[in-house]
Image: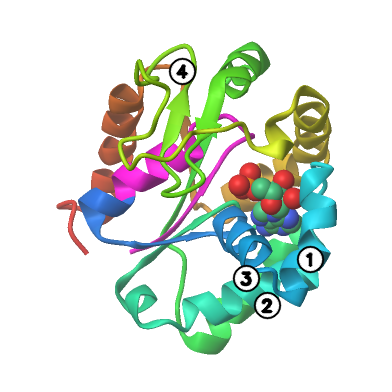
Amino acid sequence: MNMIIMGPPGAGKGTAAESIRAAYGLAHISTGDLLRAAVKAGTELGLKASVYMDAGKLVPDDVVIGLVEKRLGEADAANGFMLDGFPRTIPQAKALSEMLDRIGRKLDVVINLKVDDDVIIRRIAGRLICPSCGTIYNAYMNMPADGLCKCGGRPARRKDDEPEAVKTRLVAYKAQSEPLIGWYRERGLLAEVESSGTPVEVFAKISDVLSKHSGAGKW
Ligand code: AMP
């Protein structure tokens, strides 16, 4: 099973993706995580990308496409993958389609998480991420009383979750990524899921879609 999970910033993609990965054993390929790892490692690519990321702007297509192609070639992606945060633009979707043709793979389903702007803003305002292990918390909903992650790290707000960067990301999403919904609908791959409930409720709806697409829920 090869899939994409998409939706605006704050739609709960990261949380849903982790549940899907754990339940279905797909390689979780998050371009945001790949880019943040490159930034943390201080590679040349990371330094280049951080300028765009800190401003809430999209990193140039060629950089991201190269990262995804390399990651798709890794062993754990052979039995199925879930792309998260990619493609973000129509040129990236075209590049993905060409890349998959080249390696003899195909997409089975694209899940689009739908959520209202006011819910997005509320979720992002409280979102904190542990810099050590990447666990996502919400300051208003599931924060440990001592403010520390289960791994001992201190969860903090991502630079691109600052209010100004969030506004820029929402504008960029609407302009560049919403056309992808139409693109995948036309290709018969789109499944829309309302992402307004708790993580458990959202995952139940996603599992429902995946089981319909996979027949028995296995692939
Ligand atoms: P995310 O964790 O998916 O919200 O991504 C964080 C940031 O990484 C984005 O705001 C972009 O700056 C960059 N990024 C992630 N994926 C892509 C992509 N497919 N194309 C361009 N930039 C990306």
Quadrant occupied by the N terminus? bottom left
Q: CA distance from mark 4 to mark 1?
A: 35 Å
Q: Nearer the viewer, residue 216 or 85?
A: 85
Return the residue at label 1: 47
Q: Is residue 198 visible?
A: yes
Return the residue at label 3: 96
Queried on whether the Cβ of the residue with tag 1 lies below 8 angstroms from ligand 1, the answer reads no
Return the residue at label 4: 196
Q: CA distance from mark 4 to mark 2?
A: 33 Å
Q: Nearer the viewer, residue 132 or 51?
A: 132
Residue 23 screen position, x and y as percent: 22, 49
Q: Which amino acid, mark 4?
A: Ser
Mark before the other along the chain sequence, 1 or 3: 1
Mark before the other along the chain sequence, 3 or 2: 2
* 69 left or right, relative to 105: right
Mark before the other along the chain sequence, 4 or 2: 2
